[in-house]
Image: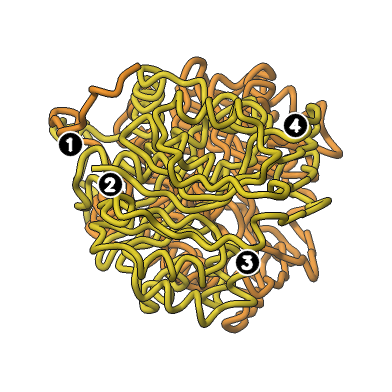
Chain colours: A orange, B yellow
Amino acid sequence: MGILVVGSVALDSVITPFGAKDEILGGSAIYSCIAASYFTDVSMVAVVGDDFPENHTDFLRAKGIDTEGLQRIPGKTFRWKGKYGDDLNSRTTLDTQLNVFADFDPKLSSVHRQCPYLFLGNIDPDLQYSVLQQMQQPKFVVCDTMNIWIENNRDSLLKVLSKIDLLVINDEEAGMLAGTSNVLKAAKEIMAMGPERLVIKRGEYGAILFGPRTVFSVPAFPVEDVFDPTGAGDSFAGGLMGYIANVASEDEITLRKAVVYGSVMASFNVADFGAERLGALTFTEIEGRYREFCKVVLFEDFNKNDGMKFDRIP
Amino acid sequence: MGILVVGSVALDSVITPFGAKDEILGGSAIYSCIAASYFTDVSMVAVVGDDFPENHTDFLRAKGIDTEGLQRIPGKTFRWKGKYGDDLNSRTTLDTQLNVFADFDPKLSSVHRQCPYLFLGNIDPDLQYSVLQQMQQPKFVVCDTMNIWIENNRDSLLKVLSKIDLLVINDEEAGMLAGTSNVLKAAKEIMAMGPERLVIKRGEYGAILFGPRTVFSVPAFPVEDVFDPTGAGDSFAGGLMGYIANVASEDEITLRKAVVYGSVMASFNVADFGAERLGALTFTEIEGRYREFCKVVLFEDFNKNDGMKFDRIP
């Protein structure tokens, strides 16, 4: 029951208040594949240039990730450079060099076309649609997108949205896509565009999962040391998708727990530069934090009478 | 097991994107007393001028609130006028007339001094301290404050903080008081100032309860129609305090549920201007929303094996 992940692979240069790193492994496919790899089999479809360090590919394979679909072509790998503000909530892109990623045109192998779970990372919706058309009846499709596609390629994005099961976006993007800042109203508008389900990510505040008749809201796992938020959203999506594929179910309780596992993976990812912490986890650590998460949000023992007096009921 | 609430009573004029209301019943003591009144006996200590409409006092009494401590003195009642931005997250104060509130000097009756639960609404910390000194060993003291006291009367505020059990403030105020924007770091700094427990309110994102060794994080109850956020924080504090006094316990699980009841009361309060909705509730509606709240945040049945496969544990 494997996951196919289509997205970007990049060499990121990141400046945070705590230091800077040059040309570290990054990109949406990297974070989501690594996060998902703890839960199930993952295949990556992406493109890199001939300057892509071999040790990165070795690292991905060591995580059990299938890199058969990671094309290596002449030219330079996608590069991104960004700087975070003091509170890590604001980010400025200093440089973007698409390089070989500019001509990315994912062609799936016959094996990859049969994957039951598909995660469409944040790439041009025309490419996402092309991937969808190559797939043979995937069981569950999750999709991410971002502001530039909402603004500049909305029609293609709407075509994609009509074919997927779950959209994962942040609150700013949801507001942009729906044209309203109220999160409940935005969710209704977006689900009317196609996806039966929607996750709105709210960064350090948590995430909300919407279904046809359900709302599930969960805070973020509180972390004291946030070093580098890059890839938090993709780690979230990878953890979410990984849990769904592991349990091989898409019912309400599974999706809710998947959102929590996504939050767990994101909370680990921000603890170090790039995917350093995310890539060095054990499943025992992940399960441990999931249990901690339960303790952080627990308030009700449904079977216990707490002694509340109801004599003031009007 | 009643609550004594000391705070402000005002005539508020509010402009929101949905309309405007002139001179409606407001002030921190009003919202917190009404919210708490659904749970337990409440006594209000505040001051109004001789222009304060008698029907407001009648309304408070009809809610079962003891208004013996509501002084009526010659002069005009405290007036506040404010305008909310389009997304309701920004607020501009257009006018503040302290009037009789400028000379507020709460003197407690011998009955009020014996109240086991005390809520110090957002007033000058020197007045809060004076109230604390008049009390006879209250069982649990909750306190609110705001930016102007943190900036202009910090020493008095620190004296108050050394004497209370729980401080309730919003995230901006927490950052200002502690000098850090990380919510966990801020919480540690603030608890080192005295209060054993702290609630940081995050508006539409929820609230976090901190204890000596515990963290409880809860999202806000998602509401589609937000009309007027005025008094949401005071309604939260009133619901929280009301539940604690009702159950007559201050253990961890009680405080967690109290935070959820506080969130429930705030979610009702924002649905109409002033305290219109808050004042017209039934306990059945409050319990109903609490149960809805449980459904919105539930993700784990601790006794059920969900079929997760652990064979990938490294």
Residue contact between numbered discs 3 and 2, judged by CB atoms under 8 Å: no
Residue type at mark 2? Cys
- Which sits in the foreground, A2 or A187? A187
Residue type at mark 4? Thr
* Residue B173 occupies quadrant: bottom right
* Residue that mark 2 sits on: A294
Measuring from the top left, give residue B238's x and y in whole percent.
43, 42
Q: Are marks 4 and 2 on the same chain?
A: yes
Q: CA distance from mark 4 to mark 2?
A: 32 Å
Residue A237 is tagged as: none
* Residue that mark 3 sits on: B147
**Dot 3 lies on which element?**
helix
Q: Is residue B153 above or below residue A294?
A: below
Q: CA distance from mark 3 to mark 1?
A: 42 Å
Residue type at mark 3? Asn
Measuring from the top left, give residue A250's x and y in whole percent.
39, 24
Q: Classify residue A248 as left or right of residue A193.
A: left
Query: Disc 3 or disc 4, which is closer to the eye?
Result: 3
Residue B302 is tagged as: 1
**Dot 2 lies on which element?**
helix
Residue A180 is tagged as: 4
Q: Chain of mark 1?
A: B
Q: CA distance from mark 1 to mark 2?
A: 9 Å
Residue type at mark 1? Phe
Measuring from the top left, give residue A71's x and y in whole percent.
61, 52
